[in-house]
Amino acid sequence: MNKKEYKIKVGDEELIFEFNDLVEKANGSVIVSYGETKVLVTATMSKEESRLDYLPLKVDYEERYYAAGEILGGKYNKREGKPSTEAVLTARVVDRAIRPFFDKSLRKDVHIVATVLSLGKYDPDFLALNGASLALAVSDIPWNGPVYGVRVAGDKEGNFKINPNYNFREDNNLFDAIFAGRGGKISMVETEAEELSNEKFLEAAELALTEMNKMTDFFSSIISERGKEKKVLPEAPETDFLKNIFEEEFRGEIISDFDNIFPENKIDFYREKFIKRISQVETSDFSTNFLGEFFEKEFKYIVREKIIDEGQRLDGRALDEVRPLWSNADRLSEVVHGTGIFYRGDTHVMSVLTIDDLDDALFLDGMEIQMEKNYIHHYNFPPYSVGETGRMGSPGRREIGHGNLAEKALRRMIPSKEDFPYTMRVVSEVMSSQGSTSMASTCASTLALLSGGVPIKKPVGGIAIGLVTEGENYKLLTDILGYEDFYGDMDFKMAGTRDGITAIQVDLKIDGISLEMIGEILEQARKARMTVLDNMEATIKEPAEMSPNIQRIKRIKIPSDKIGLVIGKGGVTIKRISKESGAKIDIKRDGDTFIYGNGQSIDEAQKMIDEIINRSL
């Protein structure tokens, strides 16, 4: 085997990139190591053009249990199956980091595969990100990278750590973030936090940029030594006559009718009118899809010009104005445990809460994560929410990603198992979508939890900020429409309480944003979040009474030397108590005991347990 290693110190360990001839057929490949964690990343491009009318990029993150030195699975199946939720989320992080640097005209399939070969004490996700960047950069695949990635975490004492190990992230963790960027700019962020201040987030971003700047010359030297000549993208077809027709016959009409386009949903009308007009030209041999893309590009220019030059948005709002809000926290019925409905303009989400005992907690037994979750959030985005027909069934990557973001936004505000010993599952149904459904899901889920009587620490609201740039000029857009996300340069989602940030997710279509701009975005998002929380708290501020359909739970402590007496030989005593009282009793090894039932049955069971303990004293 021919191989060569390149090393750079990042955080506490050396980040090592190994190139060898193990994967010969891929366009680019590299093995990335940090401590004992190793990830193989490959980049491959198809030889033929795709029929899709968008960039066909796919990222897969492959977990292999051998990487952890374990054999997992059921008795009759020991092979890895479909990607876990954690694998999907990591693949999305890598995708979001590298996608902005592809030419949007590329129509060949590009496939990034990150395979975990060894799992040490460091998370493989930032290795996969950097490996994908370098595998693409040295390959012949057209790509305008590289981009660099680091993880930054902080504890509650204010200490920051670059690429921390699992233990640091789990112990007394204030926030945990992955940043991607280059050239002194941030291009992707994924953050979970416990009421992080704007100032602390900026400190973390600045530290991330400092570490990423160290990697610039290092990557450049590798690329200059190993990089292949990039394949040339096919020349775009001549479209001058399309441009002339649009400018002469459509641009003026669209601008004069700009105030009515969004309220009257006239984008499709003008698109179809343009396609019909071009079809009358005998020399036109463009497909309908191509003409639709061309119209969208020209219409995008008009929308962006209006925002930059006049501060005018499609729906007529001020740049920093939140759409009309409406919320409701009335339960759907006596059967349902909690309901929250949240409207932000034409984005409508209904979240429904179900509460049960801790036996219904979700047990995760994956390559990286072994834990029980008693707060679960799921997100559904049916096709009718955008007025379309389509596939229904198991959740796709988008549903998993958006659901996880809303879950992270609320996770640190959920009461502990000791204070609220229940399992909570919230399902957010997107009923109507016009931008930022994940943040609307966060709001609706807060309402649902309060409606169901869950004593969350503080309400959480979410908002998305957009961006339109033109050279050095830029405009920030509060509470972006779906169209503004599509035609703009950024989707900066931020959730939090009145006192700080709980989650951030940033996606960019440009090469990055500066720290100064991030500071401005954070403050604009904070003000909008206060508006959202005002509306939610006017609807419900304190937990409602729990539904009578939910069995009550009482937590008591049995002395460890009395556990055997309460259980009895073969469990005979505890079974008798449960049968006579009508309560369900769960005794842990440390004596922690949960009694499930209605008020009377719980009291009766506790009385019988106390009598057994007192008799033995």
Image (cartoon, grey):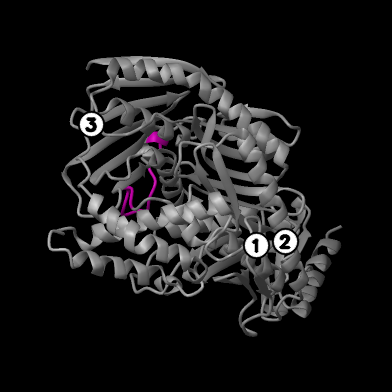
Q: Position of residue 207 (x, y in %)?
A: 62, 27
Q: Nearer the viewer, mark 1 or mark 2?
A: 1
| Residue on which disc 1 sits | 322
What amino acid type should be assigned to the residue bearing mark 1?
A: Val
Q: Earlier in the sequence, mark 3 or mark 2?
A: 3
Q: Amino acid at mark 3?
A: Asn
- Residue hosting label 2: 531
- Is residue 24 shown above or below 586? above
Given residues 276 and 101, the one toward you in this image is 276
Majority SS type along the magenta span: loop
Which of the 4 image quarters holds residue 223? Answer: top left
Quarter of the image for residue 532 reads: bottom right
- Between disc 3 and disc 1, the foreground one is 1
Residue that badge 3 annotates: 27
Residue 565 seen in the figure? no
Mark 3, other Cα within 10 Å: few <14 / some 14–19 / many ≥20: some
Image: magenta residue range: 67-81
> For the image shown, how many numbered marks are present on the structure?
3
Camera sees residue 148: yes
Q: Toward the viewer: 83 or 329?
A: 329
Which residue is at a point 56% across and 22% down the rendered structure image? Answer: 11
Q: Secondary structure at mark 2?
A: helix
Which element type, helix, strand or loop, lies under badge 3?
loop
Circle 1 Cα neighbour tier, 10 Å, few/some/many (<14 / 14–19 / ≥20): many
